[in-house]
Amino acid sequence: MRYLIVGAGAVGGAIGGRLAQAGHDVILVARGTQYEALRDHGLRLVTPDGPHIHRLPVVAGPEELGELSPDDVLVLAVKTQDSVAALDAWAGRPVAGGGTAAERLPLVCAQNGVESERLALRLFRRVYGMCVWLPATFVEPGVVSAAGTPLTGILHIGRFPGGTDETARRISADLKKSLFESPVVPDVMRWKYAKLLGNLANAIEAVSGVLTSEEGIALHRRARAEGEAVLAAAGIAFASQEEEKESRGDKICFEPFDGSERSGGSSWQSLSRGTGTIESDYLNGEMGLLGRLYGVPTPVNDMLQSLADRFARERRPAGSMTVADLVAAADAATR
């Protein structure tokens, strides 16, 4: 199997780098300065077992590859707000022997949130969800840090909307050879909805800094309580926190291994890089959407979504709002 990593940033770079290190065939897909750095200098993956330089093929888009192989696996690792453009770009690409990527190739959504699988299934016939527990950071163009040890990450995988198959098992086997644990599960979205509840903290972290204060943690509890109420009203199952804890165990320690201060997650990184976009519409915004569909108020999540979006649009610095001010905004939204 050849892995096409569509979005070779933090998560995509870590997955692609570890697969390549284990001897698997990998092509990275990137844009802008990341594409240029990967093309000119390779991928530098910094891990607890040392830095690794991977000189991998890199393309800016599918046109550079021509006809795809029937053994290709597309791993979608862009942020959800970029999914539609990526899916449109790859869906119609011809595959050797006939047909298109959308008709013949498996596509794995290695992303936060739960929307990309639905978007992909409009085009692709074989869609897989992946619940990504993978502490990784985009350090600078061409450089990704993956701090997880002894495992680099845990990547639950399964068919969307449900089930398992031989392809999922083959992908899982390759990942297991690449310092990941990759359970094949028939209910992968149950795991992704559980992670979504945790990711409701991303906006809090992005605007007010790494989540360590009791005030910030309490605010996440409020956002999560709204989310759990929404999922209950919608009849959507999610893995319990006890199941998540048991699954992770002590398999991933992700404190920085180089003595540096711990950086924030994916939303914090979007603000710190000044990308102009953020995934809060598909995290807190998913709860707002379901809340409006099922008549459940979600004022805390609505506020967090709007505030994170404003920070991204105005390119405000990550962590530049105090937790006290953020809590005050949440209190005002719930009055």
Image (cartoon, rainbow, N blue to C red):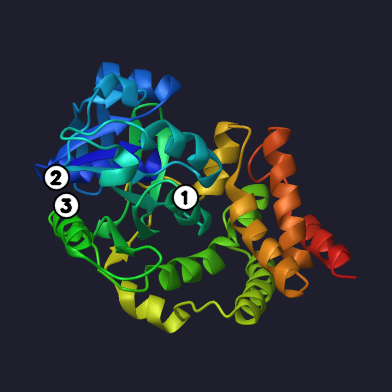
The crowd level at tag 1 (other Cα within 10 Å; few <14, some 14-19, many 20+) is few
Instruction: Tell me the residue that label 1 is attached to.
Output: 122
Question: Label 3 amino acid?
Answer: Ser
Residue at left offset 26%, top offset 58%: 149
Callout in the foreground (2, 3): 2
Q: Taking 173 as reference, is 43 above or below it?
A: above
Residue 295, image x, y percentages: 77, 74
Residue 217, image x, y percentages: 62, 68
Quadrant in which residue 172 is drawn: bottom left
Q: Are marks 2 and 3 in contact (CB under 8 Å)?
A: no
Instruction: Tell me the residue that label 3 is attached to.
Output: 178
Callout in the foreground (3, 1): 1
Residue 85, image x, y percentages: 50, 34
Residue at left offset 21%, top offset 65%: 165
Pointer 2 or 3: first along the chain: 2
Residue 316 visible at all? no
